[in-house]
Amino acid sequence: MNRRHFLGAAGAAAVGAWTPRGLTGVAAPGAAARRLTSPCLGAARVPTDLPVPSAAQLSWQRDETAMFVHFGVNTFTNREWGDGTESPALFDPRGLDARQWAREAKAGGFRAMILTAKHHDGFCLWPSALTDHSVARSPWRDGKGDVVHDLVEACRAEGLRAGLYLSPWDRHEPSYGDSPRYMDYYVGQLTELLTRYGPVSEVWFDGANGEGPNGKRQVYHWERIHRTVRTLQPGAVMFSDAGPDVRWIGNEDGAAGDPNWSMVNPALVPYAGFSGPGVERALQHGDRDGTVWRPGEADVSIRPGWFWHPAESDRVKSAAALVELYGASVGRNSKLLLNVPPTTDGLLHDVDVRRLAEFRARLDAIFATDLSAGASASAIAGRSDGGGPAAVLDADPDTYWAAPDDAPQPWVEVDLGRPVTFDTVVLQEAIQLGQRVESYRLQCWDGARLVTVARGTTIGHKKLDRFAPVTARRVRLTIDAAMAAARIGRLALYRTPPDA
Ligand code: FUL
């Protein structure tokens, strides 16, 4: 269920997401590359002005994918949104095994799991001392179970990070809508979650909202909520429409915008659940001139619903669709948060497990061999700190090629030493120094001249371009426009095997 009516079509771009804009295949040999006139550094900001990620934001983005786990009373009522009147007696996932979730998440290449500790119905998956609307009143493990504990332990055992979703909207809690009282309740629950279970890497604040039981509207004290998280879990990132650390990407289809900046203008989306003109655009694309670093997270479910519904087991996304989603999220400077909901048994369903494994196998097949390994690299003359042109060939995120400050269209080129056929290019900026590139071209030498095979806008942490196979010995990345001199961490080439 979409939480905002304006979102319906926003993520439609997922199909064909890896295909560069305006290019359906390889340019005909000899076709002249269109010369862009935009000056590279026309509106350059000085590097000291550029927003940069915090350590937590950087490792959050480098994780690239996380698994979302929607689980609760809705799993048992077969609904998407509970109304808060559900009896805790319904909750009885007899075979619950969070280690199975974590094992499959890890096998799928995910680096974290985020659990709905409380959804809008208010039922708590941990024994909160602040309400009896929780697992403590359920028959599951005689009321002694704690799903949050199990999830966190399973994450630790499998080397994953653990995140928690605590719905601000609560349709059960009587104090909801009585603003100061509910804020005490909500902050009290956050405090339980952030003090009982060890490190939490991400706290997820959903934007869906409604009236309280008496028609009273809840006013949130976000400043207090944020302070609570910062104090109790300084290493965690906070997600919401309005961050403060990572932002919702503006749709629930898993697709980032193109361009996609990690900077935002915070005034455009002042709080979670805010809707107004320009919000969707601001979330999808970020803001080239934004003053705050707030990268986008693209959430989407492997099934039509967020919660498990038996009737949807034949509508689980295909591995090919999941690979497209990866391109539309991770491949556009976002992070993929893929929801895989456990069943009433408390286990991930076989079909979903199979799809995750197929998804990982396809990605592994595409990215099995970096064809630029062993190549040599050169670049336009000029200052070159950070490792020089060859730094684009290694996978070390701390080394990069630094474009000269004053070149209008700087380039870096990879010489493969022999003709190589490829159809996928990975570009990365050294985002620890900010996000800078606004538009670029990928070109190949056809023997006599440069032929453009892909054009793009932003790069950020990662940009993936896929096109019909091209054979070339030399591949050039030209930066046509940038906020400040580009810092390119990686240029890697791959060829998709026939079955991936
Ligand atoms: C939305 C919620 O209303 C959905 O139920 C789901 O949790 C999704 C991730 O966020 O706003």
Image (cartoon, helix red, strand yellow):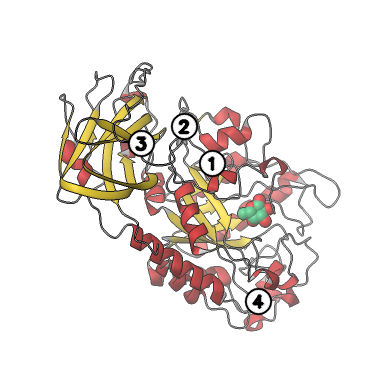
**Residue 138: which quarter of the image?**
bottom right
- Give yes or no for contact between labels 1 and 3 (Cβ–Cβ under 8 Å): no
* Residue 164 on image: x %, y %: 54, 58
Mark nearer the viewer, 2 or 3? 3
Mark nearer the viewer, 2 or 4? 4
Residue pointed to by mark 4:
344
- Gap between marks 2 and 3, in whole Å? 38 Å
Judging depth in this view, the residue of 361 and 267 nearest the camera is: 361
Q: Is residue 403 left or right of residue 62?
A: left
Compared to residue 311, the image places residue 213 above or below, namely above
Please name the residue shown 41% across and 34% down the image: 458
Residue pointed to by mark 3:
27
Q: Is mark 2 within 8 Å of ligand 1?
A: no
Residue pointed to by mark 2:
292
Residue pointed to by mark 1:
243
- Give yes or no for contact between labels 2 and 1 (Cβ–Cβ under 8 Å): yes
Labels 2 and 3: the sequence-earlier one: 3
| Few, some or many residues within 10 Å of mark 1 (<14, 14–19, 20+) | many
